[in-house]
Image: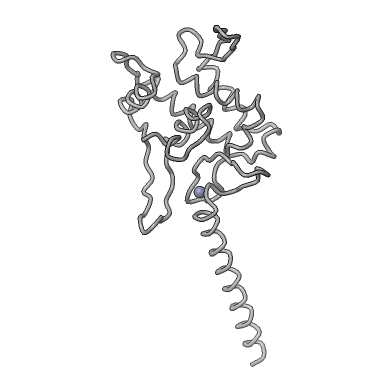
Amino acid sequence: MKLSKKFVVPPELALLYDFVNSLDLRQYTEKGKQHEGHDELATAGQLEEWMRERGLLGARAHVSAQAHRMALKLRAAIRDYLGVAPEDRSAQSQAIVQLNELSAAFPLAVAASGGGRITLDPAPRSSALARVLGEMCLLSVTARLERLKVCSSEECLWVFFDRSKPGNRRWCSAALCGNRHKTRSYRQRQREREVSSLRASLRSI
Ligand SMILES: [Zn+2]
């Protein structure tokens, strides 16, 4: 099942969403089950399958080892970029430099089609994965790219699309990652209180 279907994200960013989350770094326990984390694109063969499933690769075409390496680098660069908090993305950063460098290997071209539609499609001889960058570009133009962000939980790091009205969510799920964070900070505060009252009672001895 495609992740974009499972988590119901707008169709125009489905490919981008599936691509960045093909690296699953979740390590928390959900409903008694421990997330193990895995990479859907660990090998060139897996990338071929992933692309074929999405109509990005012909039945007989193959992904070379070099193309596989580049795809993983592109994914890392996009994840790093999305990992920058939206309010900080306007500042120059290593993530921007890296994304621009990688994007050069996945060129896009303007494609006009019937119906007056103009889209950004992979340029001739470019990898079909360039479509991921096309989706990113569209999201930026429609001011929704800042809604795509990495979950603030270190043991999650899932890339989620923030549908909340103010667009200020930090966690992919308030019920899971948000709650874990709240419980943890509550325990932390409780421990601090216990330590300071213990210190106070020791001083009074
Ligand atoms: Zn999360």
* Above or below 61: residue 158: below
Colour convention: one colour
Question: Number of numbered discs present?
Answer: 0
Looking at this view, name the residue that lies furthest to the front.
115
The C terminus: image quadrant: bottom right
Q: Nearer the viewer, residue 83 or 176?
A: 176
| Residue shown at the point (43%, 54%) measured from the top left | 28
Is 62 on the left or on the right of 22, as rendered? left
| Residue shown at the point (64%, 35%) measured from the top left | 146
| Residue shown at the point (62%, 32%) measured from the top left | 145
Q: Position of residue 120 (x, y in %)?
A: 56, 15
Q: Nearer the viewer, residue 163 or 34?
A: 163
Q: Position of residue 138 (x, y in %)?
A: 60, 23
Looking at this view, name the residue that lies furthest to the bottom.
205
Picture quarter containing residue 2?
top left
* Above or below 203: residue 14: above
The N terminus: image quadrant: top left
| Residue shown at the point (35%, 18%) measured from the top left | 64
Picture quarter containing residue 40?
top left
Is 11 on the left or on the right of 88, as rendered? left
Q: Position of residue 110 (x, y in %)?
A: 58, 10
